[in-house]
Image (spheres, helix red, strand yellow):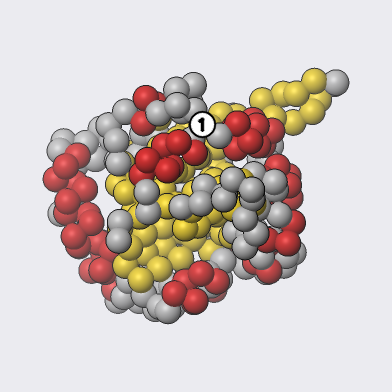
Amino acid sequence: MSEFALVYTFERDAGMPMPQPDAVVSALQGVVTPAECSGFDVYVPHPEHDRFDFFRDGAPPLVIVECRAHSLPALERYAGDARLQAALDHIACAPSGGHDVALGRWRAGIFRVECELAATPQQAAAAALALVVHYYGPVDDADAFVAHYVANHPPLLARLPAVRDVRCYVPAAAAPTGVAGLADLAADPAIIRNEVWFDSMDALLESLRSPVVAEMRADARAFARYGHATHYPMRRIRLAGAARSPDNGRALSASDRPRAFDEGST
């Protein structure tokens, strides 16, 4: 069954602090997800990101909020949810001198999700680290790039030791800003997004010593020409509550905060 994702990516302005994980989770508590929601995750910079210098992209400048569902129309409707928009606005600002100061800006996109499950669903669900990769233009042939990537790269990634899940995010609409609730946000410019899930930073670093990495590099040389890519290790915080709201949505609550969020865990 096809899965889709509504993805909000926060990029902090130069010189501004990142929103703190506690503040991000707190802002999203009480937000109600659609009944069709199959997952609601938050990604914040991993506390051990300094150990990851494989691509030398530096510290993650991003916070990501992601809602997944098997229904594309459900996500398009959810993009206009007032409670979600208020939470995102709150995350993007910090009080200073009696008024709010913008820390950065959100971009948004709706994607089709292609998965290469490399472990049991239970192991994948518990994975607390995601290596989040974005590919950007300009690109000679976006369709050719996506077709080659989806067909060839995820199966290679899934062979890395200790990998839990591999997810490719392909833009699902040419103009996501035409969706209510997204019109005022920048469209996500990624040609493709990729998430590779691990249990810990140790597991990620060990996987990069695998001979599979040489095969991945060989495949990358066959990509259609593109602009650049970024690779950031992020802490994955699952937000998903069992309780249903009166309108049959799923309410996020303080009890949904997973162990992966606790201080010192990865």
Residue 123 horizontal side relative to residue 237, left or right = left
Quadrant of the image occupied by residue 244: bottom right
Closer-to-camera residue (85/207): 85
Q: Position of residue 249 (x, y in %)?
A: 57, 49
Instruction: Name the residue at 51% across, 51% down.
Output: 35
Instruction: Name the residue at 23% across, 56% down.
Output: 150
- The kind of residue tagged 1 is Gly
Task: Give the quarter of the figure containing the C terminus.
Answer: bottom right
Quadrant of the image occupied by residue 263: bottom right
Above or below: residue 6 compared with residue 164: above
Question: Which residue is denoted by mark 1 in the rendering?
Answer: 80
Above or below: residue 46 compared with residue 86: below
Closer-to-camera residue (157/250): 250
Per the image, label 1 sits on a secondary structure element best described as: loop
Q: Position of residue 7 (x, y in %)?
A: 46, 43
Closer-to-camera residue (41/102): 41
Task: Give the quarter of the figure containing the N terminus.
Answer: bottom left
Residue 49 horizontal side relative to residue 4, left or right = right
Instruction: Name the residue at 32% across, 67% down.
Output: 116
Q: Position of residue 126 (x, y in %)?
A: 55, 71
